[in-house]
Image (cartoon, rainbow, N blue to C red):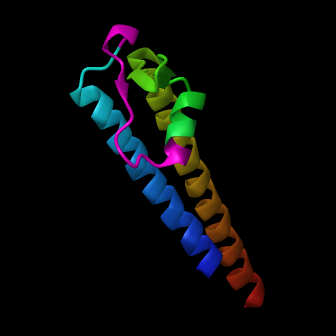
Amino acid sequence: MSTGATTAATMVVMNRAAIRKLVQHFETADATDAARAIPLPPKAPRAPVKRLVKDRILVPAGDDRFYLDREAQTHAHARGSRAGGIIAILVVIGLVILLALVLIGVTVAR
């Protein structure tokens, strides 16, 4: 794996971990509506916050306070699960095609 790919993979893992921590912060505080909105945790990374706001999982409530939209979170989780399943199927199809090409190559080489 190239250094760039390794760095990208590390960034994705770190980003997902930061998102999980942010969601847990709001779940622990039960900040699930505007009346219970809370500030972001200290030193919260900007990219995961932007992503959660863009996906409408974190909803700004004014005065630098946010709350967690559980419905949007559930929807995003379901969408992610479907995407993971599709990726797994595509990987399997790719492996089957690769195996077929190797077998064809071995047969032709004889």
The x, y position of residue 31, in whole percent, is 31, 20
The x, y position of residue 26, in whole percent, is 31, 29
Tell me: residue 2, above or below residue 93. Answer: below
The residue at 49%/66% (across/down) is: 10
Q: Nearer the viewer, residue 18 or 80?
A: 18
The quarter in which the N terminus is drawn is: bottom right
Residue 30 figure quarter: top left
Q: Which residues are magenta?
A: 33-48
Q: Residue furthest top?
A: 35
Tell me: residue 43, above or below residue 71. Answer: below
The quarter in which the C terminus is drawn is: bottom right
The x, y position of residue 53, in whole percent, is 54, 29
Residue 40 figure quarter: top left
Q: Is residue 39 magenta?
A: yes
The residue at 47%/49% (across/down) is: 45
Q: Nearer the viewer, residue 109 or 21?
A: 21
The residue at 61%/50% (across/down) is: 90
Viewed as shown, does residue 82 lie left or right of 71?
Answer: right
